[in-house]
Amino acid sequence: MNTDVFAAYESNVRRYGRSFPTVFKKALGATIWDEAGKPYIDFLVGSGALNYGHNNPNIIAPAIEYLVGENILLSLDMYTVAKREFIEVFVDSILKPRGLSYKIQFPGPTGTNANEAALALARKYTGRSSVMAFTNAFHGMSLGSLAVSGSASTRELGGVARHDVIRVPYDGYPTQAFDSASYIDYVLSDPGSGIEKPAAIILETIQAEGGLNTASAAWLTEIQRICRKHDVVLIVDDIQAGAGRTGEFFSFEFAKIAPDIVCLSKSLSGSGSPFSIVLIRPDLDIWNPGEHSGTFRGNNLAFVTAGAMCKMWSDRQFTAGVERTADKLQRHLDSLVAKFPKCIEQKRGRGLMAGLKCRSQAVVGRVHDVAFENGLLIESSGPNRDVIKVLPPITITDEELDHGIAILDHALKEQANGN
Ligand SMILES: *Cc1c(COP(=O)(O)O)cnc(C)c1O
């Protein structure tokens, strides 16, 4: 496999290319092939950006039709037919059936663009500068987003001051015995706490990069109550956990909350094409025209593919299939936990956003390498990189899922026997 050009010319910053040292060429569904024709099952899925699999025909067919028709591709934030159709289908297939009402902001195409817009709006709306963010959070690599992220290495990257962030413990941090929601309520109520009232609380319902830590429905409900009580904007960063990853469209549906602002990106286009939106409680939408902008707010090909993805959520057969796949994945992981106690400490995550907390980073590293050799792509997460992320496409077939799990089982068995 010729990787010379990457070593010679691509920046030292490259990572996944090093951990999967081959050259990929083709992909369909949950399978990705390298140049030599070797297939791999993809449990990495673009870090949650390919929830609907590679080249999902329901999503790609309308894109191909759109591309050959001399249709608009880039439109800033002008009105286009593709954008009108996306808004209509998003409202009808996603928001209305869930009883949600939001205005939609189209920021730049990345997840961090959406978070920056959300933070800026919350600060403008409340006139306050600080934001509460959680231990082990990850919100992106631009300055405002990395300021609210938890990881020391991420935060240091900016190389400049990261003010105006109040770090608070996530659900279950440092242990399940600590009631972090009560703590937050208490410090916001106590004039002697030394903690000023923030503009917003920003959270992930499952901390993907933070190690698949999950927030309970009770905790999320309590955080929403606290935000309302103290007049603080609740921002849910649903960039990785949303767009179907947990088995529901939004990751917070199970808790029956309605955040003030929701950020979506990653799998939102359904195709891997960059696209993000910020959902804003209507009375909070106090932007002045043109006050926030970005060149790539009008990626019309993404409007088309995202619309096709949203339509799938109106199909009962599709949603039932996703639920069934989520159950099947959870059962597979339960059996791996039971089988390999020497390697695995516990199952993490929820629905199809799952992981295995292992005994050490070394175990995860070796499982990753053996899995890759045998045709499975997985990645690690968590502050100590000792959690195996298991993120198959939510549309994965039973055969592909079973095959991927069998490769993982084999890699874990080698470690368990070697220990
Ligand atoms: C990936 C991710 C982001 C950042 O998205 P980018 O497109 O990489 O800017 C923000 N928040 C969460 C939870 C993410 O997983």
Image (cartoon, rainbow, N blue to C red):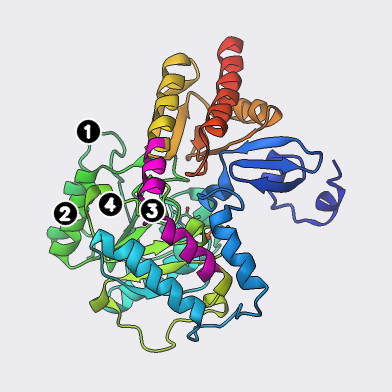
Q: Foreground mark, 4 or 2? A: 4
Q: CA distance from mark 3 to mark 4?
A: 18 Å
Q: Circle 1 is placed at which residue position?
A: 177
Foreground: 312 or 53?
Answer: 312
> What is the three-letter code of the residue carrying label 1?
Ala
Q: Circle 3 is placed at which residue position?
A: 315
Q: How many marks?
A: 4
> What is the three-letter code of the residue carrying label 3?
Asp
Looking at the rendered structure, the secondary structure element under dot 2 is helix
Q: Circle 4 is placed at which residue position?
A: 253
Q: CA distance from mark 1 to mark 4?
A: 25 Å
Image height of 409 relative to 264, above or below? above
Counting residues from the start of the chain, the first of labels 1 and 3 encountered is: 1
Q: Is residue 147 visible?
A: no
For image coordinates 60% across by 61% down, the residue present is 61
Q: CA distance from mark 2 to mark 3?
A: 41 Å
> What is the three-letter code of the residue carrying label 2?
Asp
Q: Foreground mark, 2 or 3? A: 3
Give the residues in magenta. 302-324
Counting residues from the start of the chain, the first of labels 1 and 2 encountered is: 1
> What is the three-letter code of the residue carrying label 4?
Glu
Q: Neighbour class for label 4 at 10 Å: few (<14), some, many (≥20)?
A: some
